[in-house]
Image (cartoon, rainbow, N blue to C red):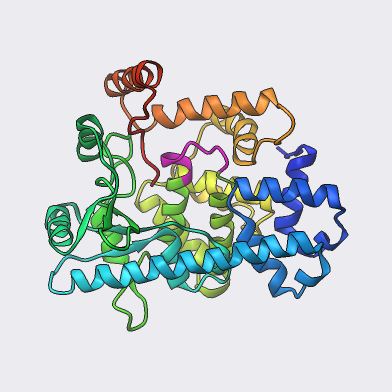
Amino acid sequence: MTYKPPAHHRLLLNAVINPASLVEYNAAEWELLLRLTRRVKLLARLAIDLKNRGLLDQIPLRAANLLQSSLIQAKRLQQVAHWELNRISWALKDTDAPVIVLKGVAYSLAGLPESGGRIYVDLDILVPKDRLSHVESILRKKGWVNHHKLSAYDEHYYRAWSHEIPPLAHAERETEVDIHHTISPPTSRLEINTSSLFSAAVAVGNSGYRIFCPADMVLHSAVNLFQNNELADDLRDLLDIHDLLLFFSKNEQDFWKKLTERANQLNLGRFLFYGVYFSRLIFQTPIPENLENDLNEKPTALSRMIMHYLVPQALFPLHPDKHFRRALAARTLLYLRSHWIRMPIHLLLPHLAYKTYLSIFRGKAVARPVRG
């Protein structure tokens, strides 16, 4: 199956795949591109791609200024997140609780070249579930507090049904810290062998930090996108998978073999299938042609066909000036899917009913299945 993107998807996709072509964009194309890119949090990524190619001075001045500003913002947010990691490490230095750094900060620690253009506004870490209360208690004693005031329902949601506790933030710095105890909600159909993730984690030089091994980092990214997220405007997360696959396939010996074997070992083949399928489909990622055949778990032919149709329409941003009913329908269906695969029906129906009640009669939001 092929993918025939609409014009505004092609405009954005071409900018990501072939940044050098942007010097040919006219003013109207730049205007639309910047609006689309901002929506999917890729302004700084576009900026660093152009900067690395020495092309920032060959595009319209207004666009160049905006991209430069986004890059400055990204670097500032990265500094804040890395400093928060430093403070977390200081707070936990006398404990024996292992900590794994996740997502954006982990990509930076792994040396991913494109990580310099990735915006992240919080710090994500993983600790063993049996050490979770201990870690939370220590952080609270040393100045971390609830980042948001939560209702009793939201608190219960996090504690009973989520794969992370309510976000914390230091009372002075206010940088959000998401503390996970696994990589998928315990209410989902996935049974994650978290101890295996810790056993395979790797140290980052002499920093004292640990991150997932290359295969686990890719698998976590795939689970995060296709299990924990609703997919709307999540093109950046698929681009993360593309970047990780490119980087590790060039720098890790026997990477593809290790990746498929690890996916099979952790029973995450279905999510790796979607990750490599859509990365290849949308970004033309150079992935071994028959890699999916080595996976023990794969989606059915019907599921592949449905996801092939729905996922690209959700990942890309909506056109800011036009309504595409198919894209809106795709987002709605994937939103429902995201809830369905994360919560059993006896929990999901009351949860959605409560959300609906609050949104209609109280005008409030309530905790939803959180992003991984």
Percent from the top left, x then y, of residue 231? 53, 39
Magenta stretch bounds: 225-233
Residue 208's image quarter?
Answer: bottom left
**Residue 319 sits inside the magenta stretch:** no
Percent from the top left, x then y, of residue 322? 74, 30
Q: Answer with left or right where residue 264 lies relative to residue 56.
A: left
**Residue 227 sits inside the magenta stretch:** yes
- The residue nearer to you, when weighing 325 against 281, is 325
Q: Answer with left or right where residue 101 lies relative to residue 96.
A: right
- The residue nearer to you, when weighing 370 against 65, is 65
Q: Residue at x 25, y 58 (%)?
A: 171
Percent from the top left, x then y, of residue 247? 56, 68
Q: Residue at x 39, y 21 (%)?
A: 359
The outermost residue toward the bottom is 206
Percent from the top left, x then y, of residue 57? 79, 72
Residue 149's image quarter?
Answer: top left
Question: Where is 216 relative to 147, above or below?
Answer: below
- Report if residue 259 is visible in the image: yes
Question: Where is 219 relative to 10, above or below?
Answer: below
